[in-house]
Image (cartoon, rainbow, N blue to C red):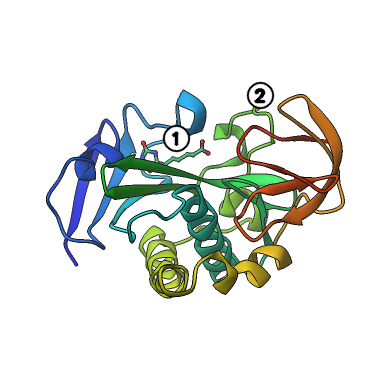
């Protein structure tokens, strides 16, 4: 698959959105000047510290794109755990947490039939370079383990996991990965607040929506106690 790598760009998402590249094309950068986060936020990182990666997907028509954030988050969690040895969980819908710290975020952007799945993984940031004021405290693989990681190795682990999980989701729907998502569900059993609704998170329904006291939530920013 084609891989575009640049030292610097506004956002790796922009290298793939509106492109005619084939499914599976990957764009990476050492630094982004306008990294995009979910809900219109910015994604800021120290140059050369992170895995900044976008993957072009062309899912079958009519499929719920929001589920791809979960598939991407699962691939990141498995990769992070594989390279670091630390258990990684998914905070619905798009954060990957280790020891309660956000080490990665996932952003799915759609253009027509194409979806660009963007992932940012905090790899080698020193503790003092991590955002201190984030809603969920930030962590990096380095801050959590005390050692440096090869970013290419982390990227390869992620892409390898995504390959298999995406194929399973494409062929079998969310049900094909639901058990793994449930096993890594950070919110399950916690008191949460989302879109003005408060209750206990009961896991994900078969469509990947968050269940709060049994009622499905489509999307939103979850606070937890
Ligand atoms: C979030 O947690 O809000 C999602 C963050 C996604 C960041 C990644 S970094 C690579 C790709 N390019 C971007 O501009 N954003 C995503």
Of all residues, the one furthest to the left in this rendering is 20
Q: Please identify the quarter of the rendering in which residue 158 is found.
A: bottom left
Find disc 1 in the rendering and name its residue.
45
Residue 52's place in the image compared with 37, above or below, is below
Callout 1: few (<14), some (14-19), or many (20+) C-alpha neighbours within 10 Å?
many
Residue drawn at 58 percent across, 48 percent down: 140
Tally of numbered tags: 2
Q: Is residue 35 left or right of residue 174?
A: left
Q: Is residue 112 left or right of residue 71?
A: left
Residue drawn at 19 percent across, 67 percent down: 1
Residue 219, how many percent across, how many down? Answer: 60, 37
Label 1 C-beta lies within 8 Å of the nearest ligand 1 atom: yes
Nearer to me, 137 or 127: 137
Residue drawn at 48 percent across, 74 percent down: 172
Nearer to me, 144 or 12: 12
| Element type at mark 1 | loop
Where does ligand 1 appear, by image quarter?
top left
Q: Is residue 148 left or right of residue 143?
A: left
Q: Residue 154 shows which numbered tag?
A: none
Q: Can residue 144 be seen in this view?
A: yes
Q: Can residue 225 be seen in this view?
A: no
Q: Please identify the quarter of the rendering in which residue 60 is found.
A: bottom left
Find disc 2 in the rendering and name its residue.
133
Callout 2: few (<14), some (14-19), or many (20+) C-alpha neighbours within 10 Å?
few
Residue 122, how many percent across, how many down? Answer: 51, 47
Residue 65, how many percent across, how many down? Answer: 44, 49
Residue 110, how many percent across, how many down? Answer: 34, 42
Mark-to-mark CA distance, 1 and 2: 14 Å
Of all residues, the one furthest to the front in this rendering is 62
| Element type at mark 2 | loop
């Amino acid at each position: 698959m084609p891989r575009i790598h640049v030292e610097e760009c506004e956002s790796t998402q922009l290298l793939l959105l509106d492109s005619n590249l084939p499914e599976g094309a990957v764009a990476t950068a050492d630094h982004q000047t306008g990294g995009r986060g979910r809900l219109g936020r910015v994604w800021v990182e120290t140059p050369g510290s992170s895995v900044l990666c976008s993957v072009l997907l062309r899912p079958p028509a009519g499929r719920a794109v929001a589920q791809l954030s979960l598939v991407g988050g699962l691939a990141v969690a498995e990769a992070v755990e594989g390279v670091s040895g630390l258990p990684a969980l998914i905070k619905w819908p798009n954060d990957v947490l280790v020891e309660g710290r956000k080490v990665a975020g996932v952003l799915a952007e759609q253009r027509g039939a194409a979806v660009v799945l963007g992932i940012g993984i905090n790899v080698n940031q020193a503790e003092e370079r991590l955002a201190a004021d984030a809603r969920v405290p930030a962590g990096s693989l380095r801050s959590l383990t005390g050692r440096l990681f090869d970013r290419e190795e982390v990227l390869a682990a992620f892409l390898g996991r995504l390959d298999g999980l995406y194929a399973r989701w494409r062929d079998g729907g969310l049900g094909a990965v639901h058990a793994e998502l449930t096993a890594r569900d950070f919110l399950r059993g916690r008191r949460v607040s989302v879109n003005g609704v408060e209750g206990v998170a009961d896991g994900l329904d078969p469509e990947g929506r968050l269940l709060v006291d049994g009622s499905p939530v489509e999307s939103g920013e979850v606070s937890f106690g």
